Image: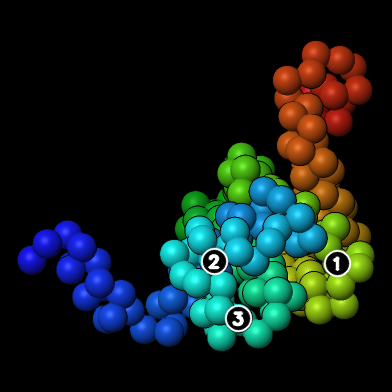
Amino acid sequence: MSAYSHLVNARVLSTAEERRETLVESAVRVFAERGFHGTPTTEVAKEAGISQAYLFRLFPTKSELYVAAVDRCFGRTLATFKAAAEKARAERAEVLPAMGEAYATLLADRTALLGQLQAHAAAVNDPAVREAVRRGFANLYEFVARASLASDEEIQAWFAKGMLLNVLAAMDAESVDAPWARALLGG
């Protein structure tokens, strides 16, 4: 069987759900780079290896596709928190700091960082994206509260530090040798 016929057969065997998964993963990467408004759906379709028409069969609107990408980003953050909490419990360590360290590591992933920042920006003008970001934060908050047993004030401070980490990572503050950068980075 030639490489071409194998590729054609693989496409035939691909289910709509597999294509949808591939499309969402592609959307996460492409939207992270250029944002909701700066990314044409043709670029997402090309990255996913599908036609734009098929993209719109899977997601009738660009907003629906973007919401799926935002949900995926929040899902990855939640999975990161869950894994860190489980490991902390197994090691009899404090859960909240362990989740914070895991989050700092997650931010080293450019796609994860940009995906979050782009979602926050898009939430300003798009009600569906705003609702996805709210839902994502609600899920994160509920898990962090259950897993850490921290007070609302501690959780608020923890999330605030996480948002500060987002901003510092976006501006690559670690490469800045200045008092403000050192202070905000915690050292």
Query: Is 5 placed left or right of 126 in the picture?
Result: left
- Label 1 Cα neighbours within 10 Å, binned few <14 / some 14-19 / many ≥20: some
Which of marks 3 and 1 precedes in the sequence? 3
Distance CA(mark 1)–CA(mark 3): 22 Å
Query: Residue 95's x, y, as percent?
Result: 64, 56
Q: Does label 2 or label 1 sit earlier along the sequence?
A: 2
Give amino acid for label 3: Phe
Q: Are marks 2 and 1 in contact (CB under 8 Å)?
A: no
Pointers 1 and 3 in contact (CB under 8 A)? no
The percent position of residue 25, horizontal first and vertical second, equals: 52, 64
C-alpha span from label 3 to label 2 = 9 Å
Image point (65%, 74%), residue name: 65
Label annotation for residue 123: 1
For residue 79, side relative to residue 160 (left or right): left
28 w.r.t. 174: above or below: below
Q: Quadrant of the N terminus?
A: bottom left
Instruction: For the C terminus, give its image quadrant.
Output: top right
Work out whether residue 17 can be spotted: yes
Mark 3: secondary structure: helix
**What residue occupies the far top of the structure in this picture?**
177
Q: What residue do we see at 58% from left, 55% from top?
A: 29
User: Which residue is disc 2 drawn over?
Assistant: 45
> Depth-wise, is mark 2 or mark 1 nearer the camera?
2
Instruction: Give above or below for 107 relative to 142.
Output: above
Amino acid on which disc 2 is placed: Ala
Q: Are marks 3 and 2 in contact (CB under 8 Å)?
A: no
Residue under pointer 3: 56
Of 95 and 158, nearer the camera is 158
Q: Amino acid at mark 1?
A: Ala
Relative image position of residue 120 (x, y in whole percent): 83, 59
Mark drawn on residue 89: none
